[in-house]
Image: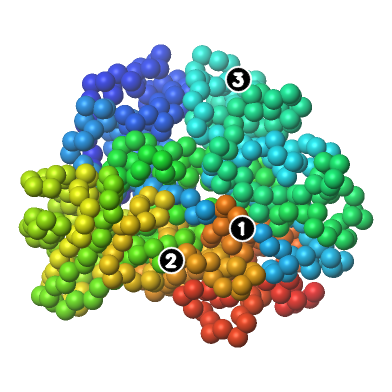
Amino acid sequence: MVASHILIEKKTAEAVARMRTCPDGLLHECGSFFRCSMAICREAVTSDAYKGFGVTYRGSEEEVRTLLNAACVRRVSEGLAFAYFYYPEELQGGREYPFGIMQKCYGLLSEQELAASGILQLRESPYTNLYGEGVLIGFLDTGINFAEASFRSADGSTRILALWDQTIETGPEAGEEGEEGVPGEAGEPGREAAEGSEPAESLAFYGREFGREQIDAALQSENPYETLPSRDTNGHGSALVRAAAGSELRQDGRAAAGENPERRQNPGEEYGGVAPLSSIAVVKLKQAKPHLRNFYQIPEEAFCCAEEDIIYGVEWLLSVAKREGLPLVLCIALGSNQGNHTGRTVLSRYLDGIAQVPGMCVTVAAGNEGGRGHHFSGQLVSGSSEEVEISVGEGVKGFTAELWAAEPDLFTIEIVSPAGEVIPRIPGRLNYIRRYSLYFEGGTIDIQSNLYDQTVGTQGIMIRFAGTPAGIWRIRVYAEGEFSGAYNMWLPITPFLSAETVFLKPDPYVLVCDPGAAREVLTFTAYDVIRGALYPSASYGYTADDRIKPDLAAPQGEELYAGTGMAAAFGAGSAALLFESAIKRADFVILDTLVIKRVFIAGAKRDGMEYPNRGWGYGKLDVYGVFIRMPGR
């Protein structure tokens, strides 16, 4: 009935007490299951006292919750749910779960040029005249500064249909325990429930959800951000929205986009983003829980978010698109070096599923890991070994390194510290977890080895350095069994690691981050349209199982937020133009990510290069070229 990726633990007495919050007894016996489960699941997602795991399942949420003895189970798609277990502070730092089932953490992948990709030609042509109208672009990032004029229509009203800020802590909302009615549309108060009906569940079950009317009301106030308390203090998310969908202003401060149809025939430079008439929906992602940040030794100052919050955000964006009756383009400028870079993380597999839905396009960033020294690859014959050297910079509090075998190869390791202390060769067990303390140099090293990782099916070894000294660390890798030993090792993405911590003999390839390595998504690398060269830190492909990634190259952006994240935003706006064209043409309306990927590849600029290749994929995005080659134009 259930194929779980987690170890089952008994609930503590306190966990059981927490579940007796319903007037009718236990959670699954409540007269209002939705109201009880909503409150418990909100706490499970936001509190560090709970650990959540992605599980595959069959059956109802309540059946799975009962079987797993979990405090909360939330279904997010067919066959995928998150299960939460009470794990109070007194147990933190105790026995660890295998790293293969821990949620992955994702960081930002950017630190706009229209003519190079054929956007201006589409606007100037009377046969196309495309601006993204009638299409919703959804963003999952650091939020949006909603009061910016770039996100408004010609009359000054907002183009943001909905905003979910996961970071705002709130109590029960309308439609939950102790209140009448059910949750309304995004950000609206609860509406009166029909007689005899159960309340409908809101997908924004934690944080705060704001609708278009609330945003417009805030824009009319003297201080919009006090009226509506959601702001992008980082700036990354707002930059993505500007690149994909921003509209520039005329001198009088009014938005030029959409002012009248005649102006749209000759826009010049009055449009800042690719799809300035598209609708916008935004998820401001909350930071990952402290226990996850500690598990992966992620610095306090780095922005990182967990798989659960991204996936819940995508589900919410899907619901907004369905409510509005619009095609949806997802822009995901996040990435991770955790996992084996074959697109088999929980998030990658989830995105592969929704990428095949008609009316949906998923655009993601390839990563900015080029030239960082964060990947090593090896090939050993049976019984042989080699040393992998990692140079650790001064002041590094901790980090992780992961080794992943190619199927069906198996490996063991031993570690030698800069001072010569030896952590002995680990045994080749099914699941091996052990902590070692360094006597002379201080600090600890945790080693976990899963001979057959539950997520990807191959062997994975994680090494976690905590409080260890700077210097050259040597990891001796031994090939086991009768097979030739192929393996890869990765260090964390750049925002999670100091620039001085690198492999001394790195491999410059196989650096496309997850979820960019997912099979069905549209993955963008970045290039400089002035120099015609790839962005210096763009991640080179292919995937670890030798699939072609990235798919295409798009402009890298400029100034503060350049990189493949901005290229993904540019690609998202371009996909919106294709959806708009499909709506107008009515003879080519069944679009999904795969179809859009194919037509973009067919229309790409190659400039005489051999393709596909590890840097550029299939070439440079050229949206105008798509329409030139489209039959029946």
Please tell me whether mark 2 sits on a helix, a strand or a loop. Answer: loop
In this rendering, would 314 be left or right of 411?
right
Q: Gap between marks 3 and 1, in whole Å?
A: 48 Å
Identity, as a three-letter code, of the amino acid under mark 3: Gly
Which residue is depicted at the point 49% across and 78% down?
Answer: 613
Q: Is residue 605 visible?
A: yes
Which quadrant of the view contains residue 148? top right
Mark 3 vs mark 2: give the one in front: 2
Q: Outermost residue toward the right?
A: 262
The residue at the point 51 percent across, 14 percent down is 178
**Which image quadrant for residue 92?**
top left
User: Which quarter of the rendered picture does the C terminus lie within?
Assistant: bottom right
Residue annotated with mark 2? 370
Kindly report which numbered mark, 2 or 1, lies closer to the viewer in this rendering.
1
Identity of the amino acid at label 2?
A: Gly
| Of 632 and 441, the residue lying toward us | 441
Q: Residues within 10 Å of mark 1 (few under 14, many from 20)?
A: some
- Would you call the spot at circle 2 few (<14 residues within 10 Å), some (14-19), or many (20 or more)? many
Mark 3 crowd level (few <14, some 14–19, many ≥20, 10 Å Cα): some
Compared to residue 78, the image places residue 69 above or below, namely above
Task: Report x, y in % for residue 575.
Answer: 66, 60
Q: Nearer the viewer, residue 520 or 19?
A: 520
> In the rendering, which numbered label is found on residue 558?
1
Up the image or down, 1 lies above or below 223; here it is below
Element carrying mark 3: loop
The CA span between labels 3 and 2 is: 53 Å
Residue 267 image offset from top left, x and y in percent: 84, 58
Mark 2 or mark 3, which is nearer the start of the sequence?
A: 3
Residue topped by disc 3: 181
- Three-letter code, disc 1: Glu
Q: Is residue 600 left or right of residue 108?
A: right
Q: Is residue 194 visible?
A: no
